[in-house]
Image (tube, helix red, strand yellow):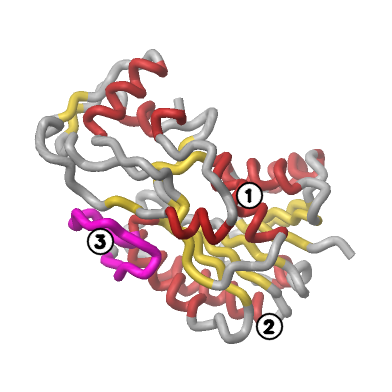
Amino acid sequence: MTQNLVITGYGWLAGYVGKALAGDVNIIGTTRSHEKCLALKDQGIEGVEYTLGDDPEVVCRHLSNATLLLNVPPGRKSTHLETFTANMTALIDAALSAGVRHIVFVSTTSVYGDSTNELINETSATAPQTESAKAHVAIENYLLAKRDQIDVSILRLAGLVGPDRHPARSLSGRELDAGNKRVNLVHIHDVVEALKKIIGSAPINGILHLCSLSHPKRGVYYIDASKALNIEPPYFADTENSPSGKVIDAHKSWEQLGVSPQYSDPYSMF
């Protein structure tokens, strides 16, 4: 019997995952849009119209012995995320009752905050500063407390880059400070390779970092990226200062996954 992979929030990242795993697993994707459901059907994916906070039964009917990929980020402009967190934990409870086999949660390295200059590994303490990061930590902790019941994989992603997505574009032409802060990025190709391992092989029950292995100053890197992308560069202060900011160490996670990241250097991402 083909394994079910249920992806909540079938957006940009899920599109790459779906293409990579098509034919290997039976993919069900949730979306808030009826039109998107129809578009997913044309791609061979069963679309489920669902908004976080709705009755989860429409999702749970697919979850018996399945993998659930939770990929529903809070809105970027949201400041009070208690409802988002409550809805996510309610969906997790419903999934457990439905007999889900494995939950993969797409989290973020922002759970560590931005006030440290340390090398951060998978066991480092979280220090969330934004409301979004605090919500991610709350959901992570809720899931980690369930590891005696099911396999739980927490993926803390650095800033995402892809063939059609690079943060240099959103920084173009802006005047910014802290050019000496280090860059923590990950390419969608490497994220997909990690997810193929996690979903297709024995699940990894714990926390993983997905990040490149080098960390240039952003005041240097984004200028070079802008030149390569032929866009107006941003203007950074403090670039000449000594490097500062957190470094996400992902060596152990890539080794645990058995994946050698193709985009281990952010300069290979443009």
Tags 1 and 3 in contact by the CB under 8 Å rule?
no
The circle on residue 10 is 1
For the residue carrying disc 1, how many other residues have a C-alpha within 10 Å: few (<14), some (14-19), or many (20+)? many
Q: Assign a secondary structure to mark 1.
A: loop
Q: Horizontally, is 43 left or right of 246 in the view?
A: right
Q: Residue at x 68, y 60 (%)?
A: 199
Check if residue 123 falls in the magenta segment: yes
Residue under label 3, please give it: 129
- Could you tell me how far apart the alpha carbons at marks 1 and 2 are, in whole angstroms? 23 Å
The range drawn in magenta is 111-127
Residue 139: image quadrant is bottom left
Q: Residue at x 50, y 60 (%)?
A: 155
Q: Position of residue 214 (x, y in %)?
A: 35, 41
Residue under label 2, please give it: 97
Q: Amino acid at mark 1?
A: Tyr
Q: Position of residue 169 (x, y in %)?
A: 38, 26
